Image (tube, helix red, strand yellow):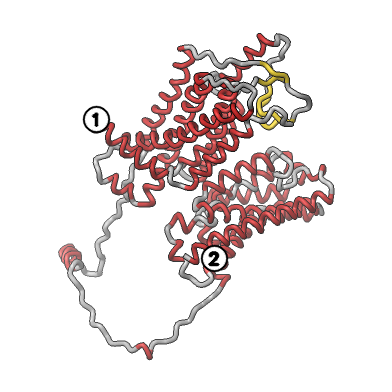
């Protein structure tokens, strides 16, 4: 009973702290908005789940199953970055040292954090379940509510995966090498692999899609069994069929519930790797003086605890020299640059140098095909993510706010240092473009130099953490420069398909977005300055 009480106290305190945060409301709103678009109106020009030209009638089973799939895929990404800060928050606030001095064991502490993470993600899932009930009424194709087909996909697909996401967030925080930017990037890669392999996972979204395809084959034996998922533009109207839901047999239920057991095993393994909140031991250095023996050293150490009185001299204010204020903006830029580059290790600099040389030596067309450009523009992610959020993470924002013209001077210095970093890391690409006389890519390069630091600065100032920029930029980078999606490809890897007029318009839009991001960061920081 004492163990359960300890775990529940940790989970309850962390859960109440999380649901009061602004980020929780943002993720909740985005998930509900995605659920709305994942059930398009019958007359919509797009579809999100196409089974070889068919879609199910909007009954309880289809809406519950389709929304459970979308919620699982979306919340597996957003939910991880939402809950991956519980242990870090205890470290920065000093709560961890209090917990370390108590009798709470590491396993109980991590179980409480896992339950709290799972509870937060479960609240969002329950909100989508309620929204699915409303969506069935709004779409109006079948208004008879069947509770089990509507709710069961969330219970046996979404919630088990949320338990794994909650456990991975705890596991990444307990591993020193994965608790920072590297862990965020690694999870994004794991998520992409999960999306790519979801069609062959018997316990993933394919579980529901296979049940849909089975009923479709009985309705239309000539169906090929192919399907598409995402925002798909319709070329012709879809045909309808009725799907009654998944037949949840006991082997199927035990398979899905075993996912929660795997999550528990992850927490057990994390408790072994977790170092706790032990502070680093500092060696006590004994004073060393010429001719000092061991007894003298001990006496000196003993006497150092005595009160030392210094004579107080009377100083008149009139004879003090005047205060000289050195308002040097370049000094501030240099300081921000040094703070940003503290995260650049020797290995980071070596890889950045290799990418610089490759960007300079390899022709533009080959760089785009071999993914050298996307690699160049993702490598400084860890350094960019500190822009705007360093003061909040270190707790110095109110101290720095006492300086003159705090908002405009410091934000400008941080943005310039970010622009300098972007220019240096992408300098090899720029030199290659100049050698080849490629003006189109030079325009894209200049827009990216202004856009990326502006996005990092705005995300850091508005949210007070670097995870927001890392998530947003990873999504934009993957869809744009990596996958070459139009309008998000800010590197212009498809400039051969872009006219000169569209090229100028696109780059002007990027510059306007950069200005808007800087303005948003300034207004937010100005509010802190006034406080």
Name the element at disc 1.
loop
Does label 2 or label 1 sit earlier along the sequence?
1
The residue positioned 39% from the left and 40% from the top of the image is 15
Q: Quick one: 267 or 291, which is closer to the camera?
A: 267
Looking at the image, can residue 52 be seen? no
Mark 1 surroundings within 10 Å by alpha-carbon count, few (fewer than 14), some (14 through 19), many (20 or more): few
The residue positioned 63% from the left and 34% from the top of the image is 37
Compared with residue 313, is residue 69 higher up or lower down, i.e. above or below?
Answer: above
The quadrant the N terminus occupies is top left
Name the element at disc 2.
helix
Compared with residue 332, is residue 223 higher up or lower down, i.e. above or below?
Answer: above
For label 1, the residue is 1
Mark 2 surroundings within 10 Å by alpha-carbon count, few (fewer than 14), some (14 through 19), many (20 or more): many
Q: CA distance from mark 2 to mark 1?
A: 52 Å
Q: Quick one: 398 or 310, which is closer to the camera?
A: 398
Q: Position of residue 531 (x, y in %)?
A: 46, 65
Looking at the image, can residue 452 be seen? yes
Q: Quick one: 280 or 472, which is closer to the camera?
A: 472
The residue positioned 37% from the left and 48% from the top of the image is 91
Toward which corner of the image does residue 198 lie, by quadrant?
Answer: top right
Q: Position of residue 9 (x, y in %)?
A: 31, 38
- Left or right of 106? Residue 202 is right
Q: How many marks?
A: 2
Residue at the limit of the structure toward the bottom, as seen here = 318
Compared with residue 318, is residue 369 higher up or lower down, i.e. above or below?
Answer: above
For label 2, the residue is 407
């Amino acid at each position: 009973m004492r163990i359960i009480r300890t775990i529940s106290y940790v989970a309850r305190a962390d859960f109440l702290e999380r649901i009061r945060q602004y980020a929780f409301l943002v993720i909740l709103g985005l998930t509900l908005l995605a659920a709305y678009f994942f059930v398009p109106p019958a007359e919509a020009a797009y579809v999100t789940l196409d089974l070889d030209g068919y879609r199910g009638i909007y009954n309880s089973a289809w809406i519950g199953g389709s929304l459970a799939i979308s919620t699982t895929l979306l919340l597996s990404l957003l939910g991880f970055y939402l809950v991956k800060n519980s242990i870090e928050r205890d470290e920065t606030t000093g709560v961890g040292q209090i917990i370390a001095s108590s009798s709470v064991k590491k396993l109980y502490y991590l179980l409480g954090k896992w339950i709290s993470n799972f509870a937060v993600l479960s609240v969002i899932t329950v909100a989508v379940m309620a929204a699915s009930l409303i969506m069935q009424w709004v779409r109006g194709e079948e208004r008879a509510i069947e509770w089990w087909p509507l709710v069961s996909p969330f219970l046996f697909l979404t919630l088990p995966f949320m338990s794994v996401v909650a456990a991975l967030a705890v596991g990444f925080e307990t591993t020193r090498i994965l608790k920072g930017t590297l862990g965020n990037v690694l999870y994004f890669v794991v998520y992409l692999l999960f999306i790519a392999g979801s069609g062959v996972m018997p316990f993933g979204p394919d579980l529901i899609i296979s049940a849909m395809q089975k009923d479709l084959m009985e309705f239309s034996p000539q169906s090929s069994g192919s399907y598409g998922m995402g925002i798909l533009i319709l070329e012709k109207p879809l045909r309808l069929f009725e799907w009654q839901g998944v037949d949840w047999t006991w082997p199927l239920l035990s398979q899905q519930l075993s996912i929660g057991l795997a999550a528990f095993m992850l927490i057990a393994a994390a408790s072994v790797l977790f170092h706790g909140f032990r502070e680093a031991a500092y060696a006590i250095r004994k004073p060393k003086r010429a001719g000092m023996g061991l007894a003298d050293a001990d006496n000196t150490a003993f006497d150092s605890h005595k009160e030392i009185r210094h004579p107080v001299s009377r100083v008149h204010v009139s004879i003090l020299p005047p205060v000289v204020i050195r308002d040097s903006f370049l000094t501030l830029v240099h300081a921000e640059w040094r703070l940003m580059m503290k995260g650049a290790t020797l290995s980071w600099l070596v890889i950045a140098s290799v990418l610089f040389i490759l960007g300079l030596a390899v022709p533009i067309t080959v760089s785009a095909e071999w993914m050298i450009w996307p690699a160049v523009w993702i490598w400084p992610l860890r350094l960019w993510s500190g822009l705007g959020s360093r003061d909040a993470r270190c707790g110095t924002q109110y101290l720095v706010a006492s300086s003159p013209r705090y908002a405009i001077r410091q934000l400008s210095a941080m943005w310039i240092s970010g622009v300098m970093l972007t220019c240096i890391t992408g300098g090899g690409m720029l030199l290659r473009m100049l050698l080849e006389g490629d003006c189109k890519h030079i325009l894209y390069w200049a827009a990216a130099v202004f856009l990326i630091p502006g996005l990092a600065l705005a995300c850091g100032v508005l949210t007070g953490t670097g995870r927001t920029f890392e998530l947003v930029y990873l999504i934009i980078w993957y869809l744009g420069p990596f996958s070459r999606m139009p309008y998000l490809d800010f590197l212009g890897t498809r400039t051969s398909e872009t006219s000169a007029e569209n090229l100028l318009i696109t780059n002007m839009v990027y510059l306007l977005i950069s200005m808007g991001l800087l303005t948003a960061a300034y207004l937010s920081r100005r509010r802190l300055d006034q406080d």
